Image (tube, grey):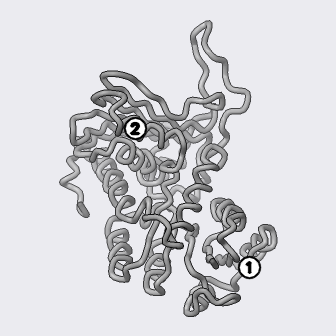
Amino acid sequence: MRIGLIGTGRIGTFHSAALVRRPEVESLVVADVDAVRAADLAARVGAEAAPSVDALFAAADSPGTPGSGVDALVITAATSAHAELIGRAARAGLPVFCEKPIALDLPGTLAALAEVEAAGTVLQLGFQRRFDAGYAAARESVRAGRLGRLHTVRAMTSDPAPPPAAYLPLSGGLYRDCLVHDFDILRWVTGREVVEVYATGSDAGPAMFREAGDVDTAAVLLTLDDGTLATATATRCNGAGYDVRMELAGEDDQLAVGVTDRTPLTSAEPDGPAAPDKPWPGFLERFAPAYEAELAAFVDVVRGERDNPCDGREALHALRIAEACERSRAERRPVRMAEIDGG
């Protein structure tokens, strides 16, 4: 199998190394708007470098031929390019794995999905938490009824430091860029849909958040369609380390995801655990096995050996929740999901 990858930044570098380790991947071709960066990455991981993104797509006219076309495409480019690249891949008949999001707005997302559906091609979205062992175990426990009736879910994502200021205006904001992972995994673990959200946020941290019209910390109360209450919080300013957790409470038992000897949390109790020696520094370290697993799944999908585990419609569901949160924060009121387009 010959795979193309577009976007050679941090996550593209990680995915490139993972793909060349797959025995099913005979060759990897990388491309970027920065041809020098693509060539450098190709040399480091043992891949080929296309001279441009257009050249990679031009070669797709002869898929499966050694030295020319590609059989599938992995998109790790800048978010603003995702929808266009998904559309081009669909028109070329290529299966696609794309990092979230499809687009930063609903019209762009719906347009890209329409192209994929019209072409009848595969689009797998990169919600890597679905491939994390802890979240998978929580899903299985909830679905098997081991917690009894689920009444409360608490989800959180805390980044150890803010992203570069230049990234904020391009990110879509904290709800779309960060909490969207919590919204997706909430649906995946519980099997329920969100019917209403009430969101608030604070921009009391670094001034760059206020300048970008974003918040550095946010909290959301979500009501699920069976009456379960969920909270989701996020911050860009968690100096203790990278902290991603989920707690699920039922009438019979409770379960926590993300509690390990690297969770950046110190107990205030005299006999409680101390701060970890090596707290998680970031998302690539925390979710490295999950990132590997989702790409392995994509390879299996392309080979026809399994169904798509996270198609584009899943990204639409999560984005609609993020859109409802933005409206709720702006208008200071609960927002029903029925108010949001694209349902």
Q: Which kind of residue does numbered mark 2 sit on?
A: Ala
Above or below: residue 34 compared with residue 181:
below
Neighbour tally class for label 2: few under 14, some 14-19, many 20 plus, Cα within 10 Å: many
Q: Residue at x 36, y 26 (%)?
A: 249
Quadrant position of residue 48: bottom right
Q: Is residue 3 left or right of residue 329?
A: right
- In-front residue for pair 52/89: 89
Q: Residue at x 62, y 56 (%)?
A: 292
Q: Quadrant of the C terminus?
A: bottom left
- Residue 61 rendering spot, x and y as whole percentages: 55, 92
Q: Which kind of residue does numbered mark 1 sit on?
A: Glu
Give me the C-alpha separation between circle 1 and circle 2.
Answer: 42 Å
Residue on which disc 1 sits = 48
Label number found at residue 232: 2
Label 2: element kind: strand
Quadrant position of residue 246: top left
Q: Residue at x 65, y 62 (%)?
A: 15
Q: Residue at x 48, y 87 (%)?
A: 92
Label 1: element kind: strand
> Which mark is first along the chain, 2 or 1?
1
- Residue 25 rendering spot, x and y as whole percentages: 66, 72
- In-front residue for pair 10/186: 186
Confirm or deny contact between disc 1 and disc 2 (CB under 8 A). Answer: no
- Residue 144 rendering spot, x and y as whole percentages: 35, 36
Above or below: residue 87 compared with residue 322:
below
